[in-house]
Image: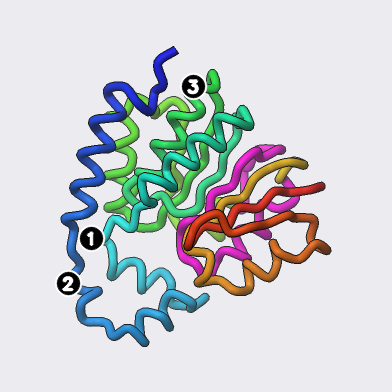
Amino acid sequence: MISTLLSAPLAPLLDSLFKEAEAATSPAMATLSGEERERLVTSKTEYMTFYSRLKDLWLPVSRETGELLYMLARSMNATTIIEFGTSFGISTLYLGAALRDNGGGRIITTEFEPSKVARARQNIADAGLSDLIEVREGDALQTLANDMPEAIDLLVLDGAKALYPEVLALVEARLRPGALVLADDADFSPEYLDHVRSPANHYLSTQVAEDVELSIRLG
C-alpha cells in the first residue's frame, strides 16, 4: 500500500503549504514586545484577542512533529482523534492521512478564527480527506464540550497554550486506557505539564522534542 502521506495529492500539497507558512508575516506580531507576547501566550482571558491578531501567521507544526503525529496514529491504529488548534490545517492533514491508511475513522478539530477555518477546510478538501475530518468553528471550550465520541484514541493540543489544562479536562474522561496526548509548545503551560507528569493523575509523560510533550493515559 502506498502511504497517503507520501503520495499525491497530499505530499505536494504539504510541500506547498509549508512554503506558504514559512513566507507568512504578521505586522501585528511585530508591534508586540517579547514581554507582551509572553504575557498573552499564557493568558487564560485574552487568548482570543491575541490569536485573532496573529491570524496571518500559520503557526504550523514542524514537518518532524507532523510525521510523528502520523506515525503515532498509524502505530496505535487510531480511529478517533481530537485536535485543539486547527490553524490552516497542516497537522490535521497528517492526522487525516493516518486515519485514511488505518482504514477510516473520525477527526474532530477546532479553530475559532473564521479565515483559518475556511482555508483549513479547503486544504482538507484538496487533500481528499474531508470525509474523515470535522472542523468545528469557535472557542474550543464550547466546541469540544458537546457531541463527543465515547472513546478517544489520540488527543492533539496545539491551540492557545494557556487552555491546555481546560481542554484536557473537557475530554479526559473519554480518553481510553492507552490513549496518547501530544501537546505542542507545552513549555508555555506549566500547569498542564504538572498535571500529566503527576503519577496521581494516571499518565506517563515525557518530553520527546524540545517543545513536544507526549503522554499516555494509563487508566
The front one of 6 and 132 is: 6
- Boundaries of the magenta span: 145-174
Check contact, mark 2 vs mark 3: CB within 8 A: no
Residue 120 sits in quarter: top left
Kindly give the residue lying farthest to the top in the view shown.
Answer: 1
Residue at image coords 55%, 67%: 163
Check contact, mark 2 vs mark 1: CB within 8 A: yes
User: Visible in this render: residue 19?
Assistant: yes
Which kind of residue does numbered mark 3 sit on?
Answer: Asp
Compared across the picture, whether 68 is left or right of 50 comes to right
The front one of 123 and 207 is: 207
| Nearest to N terminus: mark 2 or mark 1 | 2
Q: Residues within 10 Å of mark 2 (few under 14, many from 20)?
A: few
| Nearest to N terminus: mark 1 or mark 3 | 1
Q: CA distance from mark 1 to mark 3?
A: 32 Å
For discs 2 and 3, the disc positioned in front in the rendered view: 3
Say what secondary structure mark 1 lies in: loop
| Residue that numbered label 3 is attached to | 101
Residue at image coords 28%, 70%: 53
Q: CA distance from mark 2 to mark 1?
A: 9 Å
Which kind of residue does numbered mark 1 sit on?
Answer: Asp
Q: The N terminus appears in which quarter of the rendering?
A: top left
* Residue 32, numbered circle: none
| Residue that numbered label 1 is attached to | 56
User: Visible in this render: residue 142?
Assistant: no
Compared across the picture, whether 199 is left or right of 135 comes to right
| Residue that numbered label 2 is attached to | 27
Residue at image coords 32%, 67%: 52
Residue at image coords 53%, 64%: 186
